Structures are given as structure tokens and as C-alpha cells.
Image (spheres, rainbow, N blue to C red):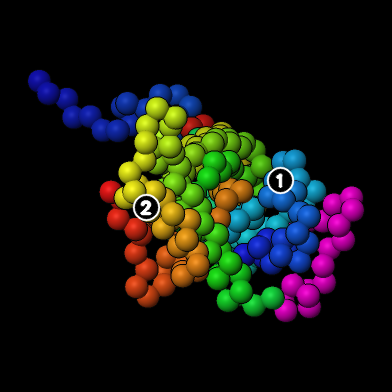
Amino acid sequence: MTQARDLADFAIAGYPVTADFFVASYSGSVSNSTLTFPTASLTSSNNVTLANNVEITPSVAGRFLVVFYCCGSMTAAGGFTPSAYIYKNTSSLHVVSGIRNHTGGAVLDWPTVSAIVDVNGSTDYIKAALFTNGGAVTLSGSGGCTAVGFRIDQ
Amino acid sequence: MSLVSKIMKLEPSLTSDDFNPETGTILVLSNAGVEIIEKWEHPSVKQPSNSKINAISDDTIIAEEKLLNLRAERNSRIEETDWWASSDLTMTDAQKKYRQDLRDITKTHSSMDDKGFAWPTKP
């Protein structure tokens, strides 16, 4: 006899059955030598809101695994040092820097950065930042500049 | 328009290292497109006034950045053909002309967006 099952049957103690998550895409541009918090928009989410164009604010407390990756177009050439950041409120939690020897008319890609962010479900927020010591970079938008986050425990 | 570009134009002794968020003494932030000077702790260069910064037009900075981009791309194209000048090779006249045309391109153009702009044809 086949037994009906639902998602709750597969839930492991401590793991949420309903996912609290967000997928955000970023647009705009990054100026030379400017720590930039780009404008975000929530592509999809559950129990997460966006404030002040950049602050991803979960309404459920817990730890979120956050991954941020970004690329953009630029025309200058040179060996730049692009850095990607994940912030909790006003403090940088994690930064990854790389070197891209860009040869002109192509794409600058930032290193992927990830962090586990502990939020209180009310005032804490997550935001992403970018930096490069090269010329202006236009962000590639949805798919090219994205942050994803998923609540992994309470 | 880039606040850093205007600051660096006013204070040419500053480099991009001075603006590094981890190691620099000056921090410029852009929050959803609004740029501000968040921190200025440079030991010898004083923060320029807002009126001095605002006196530099966006058009000036854009034109300089376009010329910078043109030079960077030009240099990249010259570097691609540096091997032509190896001691065991002899450059043809066409190769010499191509490299010279690249060097001279900033005499006639200041931006890759200029009307009629085209890179010399590689032989």
C-alpha cells in the first residue's frame, strides 16, 4: 500500500520545513575606488523584505547562508583588484579579493563571497558591497549580479 | 559621476590605494547610487571642500575617463604585437605603420565613442 507523504515527513529536527530565503539581483554601476552598495531588488523571497534599496531584512530570526557573486562590463584595461563584501548591518562580515587582468572591452568579474549571517529577525539586515581600484563598471543585472540567502537554522 | 575621480583630480598625489576600504585612509561610499565621503584620515592631504569638488563638472571627468580608456585599450593592442619587435624578427613596413598608427591615435581621437573612430587594421 502506498502511503501519502508530505514535506514534513522529510524534515530533519532543527531544519525548517518552509524555506526562508531570498534571491536578489543588483543593478547600477561601481565607480573607481568607491565602496559601493549597489541597488538591490528581490527577485524572489520568503519572509524577507528590502529596505532603503540595499538592506535585505529577514523577518525570521536565524542564520542565513549567503552567497554573493557579481560581474559587470567595463572598457578600461589593467590588472585590477576587485573585492566583494557581505555586510551585516554596518559591519563587513567577509570580503574576498581577486585580481583580474582585464584586457579591455569585456567583463570584470568579482570573486564569489559567502558568509553565514546571524540575524535577529527584526532590525538586522544583510547587504552586499563591491569595490575595484579600476575604472567605472556597469553591473550586469539579473543573473550577472546576484545574492542568494537561505536560512539554515534558528 | 565618480566622487573619487574628482577628488583625485583635485589632489593628484592620491592613488587608488588611498581609497582601499581595508588599508586606505579615505573611504568613499556609494549607497544605492549616492556617493559620500565616509572617512578622511589621510596624514598629509586635507579633505577638499564640497564647493571645490562640485566645481569640477561631470563632463570633464567623463572626457578624461574616456581618454584613459582609449589609451589603455591602445596600449593593450600595442602590447599584443610586441613580439613583432623581437631581435630575431624583422618588422614589415605594414607592421611598423600599424604600431605607429596606434601610437598616433590619440592625436586625432580622445574617445572610442568619437564619430568615425576606428582602430587601425592589423596587417
Between disc 2 and disc 1, whose residue precedes? 1
Categorize mark 1 by other alpha carbons within 10 Å: few (<14), some (14-19), many (20+): some
Number of callouts in the render? 2
The residue lying toward the viewer, choosing from B82 and A148, is B82
Circles 2 and 1 on the same subunit? yes
Please name whichever residue, B52 or A125, is drawn nearer the observer in this view of the structure. B52
Answer above or below: position of B103 versus B58. Answer: above
Can you give x and y, in whole percent of width and height, for residue B6 in the image? 69, 67
Q: Which labelled disc corresponds to residue B17?
A: 1
Q: Position of residue B5 (x, y in %)?
A: 66, 63
Magenta range: B37-55
Confirm whether residue A151 shows in the render. Answer: no
Q: Residue at x 76, y 45 (%)?
A: B24
The image shows residue A106, relative to residue A52, as above or below, that is above
Residue B38 highlighted magenta (yes or no): yes
**Chain ID at mark 1:** B
Which residue is at the front of the view, A83 or A75? A75
On screen, residue A93 above or below B14: above
What's the residue at 32%, 26% (across, down)? Answer: A10
Place of residue A47 in the rendered image (x, y in percent of width and height, measured from the top left) = 47, 50
Q: Disc 2 marks which residue?
A: B98
Residue A154: which numbered mark, if any?
A: none
Q: Amino acid at mark 1?
A: Asp
The chain ID associated with circle 2 is: B
Q: Is residue B38 left or right of residue A138?
A: right
Apparent side of residue B73 relative to residue A31 in the rendered image (left or right): left
In space, the residues marked 2 and 1 are separated at their CA atoms by 35 Å
